[in-house]
Amino acid sequence: MLFPLAGELPDTPIVSRFLAKIALEAMALRLVEFPEGVAYLCDEAQLDVLRDHARRGYVSPWPIHIRTIYHQDGKTFGPEGNAEQIVHEFDFLVTDQSEWFFVLAIFGVEFAINLGGPEISGYRRWLEQTGGLSPLYTDRHGGLAAMPK
């Protein structure tokens, strides 16, 4: 997938399908050491709609949330104190409404998709409740101090 060098990403189902595919792969990565977890991921009926969207785009539109959370050249400091560029990072967010979101940042652009269905309002609500803090930089991840400069 090619991202434009400037401006907004195209408002097409391709971007949400791309994000759905990455979300499923990220779940598999987290479960790779647990064969029963991978089997669950493959067989879980609740994920059928997400899988169908990723594979065939059956549900369209599937809204996603996109925003810039730091400059594309943002740096953080590694264990030895060296400045390092963050190319990508991801995590899962479970809201107090039991909604599951996959959140991915690529060169400072944050993407979020609801794993349960084509609805993004729960993510916007979570952002409002947390003052716009990225789920990638909550207390679980070291808080705002961990945010790239």
Image (cartoon, rainbow, N blue to C red):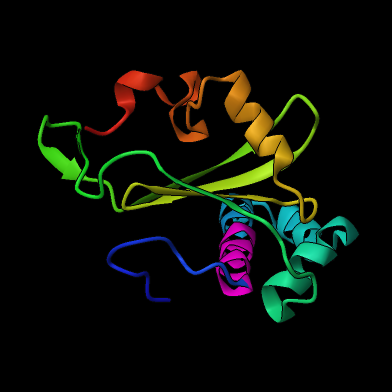
Q: Nearer the viewer, residue 136 or 124?
A: 124
In the orientation shown, which residue stands out farthest toward the front?
A: 7
Q: Nearer the viewer, residue 128 or 108?
A: 128
Residue 134 drawn at (x, y percent): 48, 32
In which image quadrant can residue 145 be found?
A: top left
Residue 21 magenta: yes
Q: Quadrant of the C terminus?
A: top left
Predominant secondary structure, magenta span: helix
Residue 87 drawn at (x, y percent): 29, 53
Q: Quadrant of the N terminus?
A: bottom left
Q: How many marks?
A: 0
In which image quadrant can residue 17 be found?
A: bottom right
In this picture, which residue range is highlighted in magenta? 13-25
Residue at 32%, 29% (x, y): give it: 147
Residue 17 versus residue 95 in the image, above or below: below
Residue 144 versus residue 92 in the image, above or below: above
Residue 97 drawn at (x, y percent): 80, 28
Residue at 64%, 35% (x, y): give it: 124
In which image quadrant can residue 84 be found?
A: top left
Direction from residue 120 to residue 75 in the image, left or right: left
In the orientation shown, which residue stands out farthest toward the bottom?
A: 56
Residue at 81%, 59% (x, y): give it: 47
Direction from residue 87 to residue 122 in the image, left or right: right
Residue at 80%, 57% (x, y): give it: 40
Q: Nearer the viewer, residue 143 or 110?
A: 110
Residue 91 versus residue 1 in the image, above or below: above
Direction from residue 17 to residue 84 in the image, left or right: left
